[in-house]
Image (cartoon, rainbow, N blue to C red):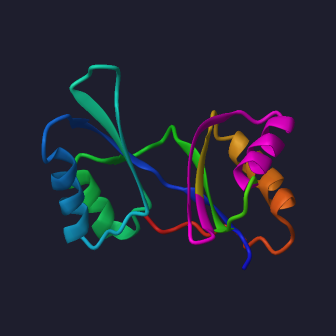
Amino acid sequence: MPYTIARANVWAAELEDHPGALGDTLAILHRAGANPEFVILRPSAPMSSIGVLFVAPLVGPQEAAAAAAAGLRQSESMYSLRITGPDYPGLLAELTRALGHAGINIHGASAASIEGHCVIYLRFECEADVPRAEQVLRSQLGPDTCPPALPPV
């Protein structure tokens, strides 16, 4: 199975830290048919009562409208790529080292491996780093890498 590398449209929102806040927000997305594969909630600062929620992907106008209703906005400052494909020990280390050797700084990373399949989200400092990073990743992962596919928003 080849790897897929695509730009990731990440949505973000500040979320009050109280019981039910995350569930209520995700329920709005669910009612619109969204099934995000990537959800991260983290505090905005130590001991803060506000968290930052990141969700991806959201596809199509119905999911975008639901995201807006839930207080999420498509991030214009998160320059990200999503990599999926077969996983093996050391894959993330190889990819991130190759990017580092190319002088590309990784501003954020999230990765999961489930039953031999990986999903990796990498965030970069600026828009100009994304095509450079994509080129490095494609050369690292081999010629069977699928072309990018941007989900409609």
Instruction: From this view, report whether residue 60 is shown above or below residue 11.
Output: below
Instruction: From this view, report whether residue 134 is shown above or below residue 37.
Output: above
In the rendered structure, the answer to whether residue 27 lies left or right of residue 93 reads left
Q: Residue 90 in the image: x percent, y percent?
A: 75, 52
Instruction: From this view, report whether residue 122 is shown above or below residue 87.
Output: above
Residue lying at 78% horizontally and 55% vertically, measured from the top left: 137
Q: Quadrant of the N terminus?
A: bottom right
In the rendered structure, the answer to whether residue 85 lies left or right of residue 18 reads right
Furthest-left residue in view?
A: 19
Q: Residue 116 in the image: x percent, y percent?
A: 63, 70
Furthest-bottom residue in view?
A: 1
How many numbered dots are placed on residues in this image?
Answer: 0
Instruction: From this view, report whether residue 70 is shown above or below residue 144.
Output: above
Magenta region: which residues? 91-119
Give whichever of 126, 20 is nearer the camera.
20
Residue lying at 63% horizontally and 33% vertically, measured from the top left: 125
In the rendered structure, the answer to whether residue 30 lies left or right of residue 127 reads left
Give whichever of 94, 3 is nearer the camera.
94
Q: Residue 136 in the image: x percent, y percent?
A: 82, 51
Does 106 appear in magenta? yes
Q: Quadrant of the C terminus?
A: bottom left
Residue lying at 77% horizontally and 70% vertically, measured from the top left: 145
Name the image quarter holding residue 15.
top left
Name the image quarter holding residue 16.
top left
In the rendered structure, the answer to whether residue 85 lies left or right of residue 30 reads right
Residue lying at 33% horizontally and 67% vertically, measured from the top left: 61
Does 103 appear in magenta? yes
Q: Residue 139 in the image: x percent, y percent?
A: 86, 59
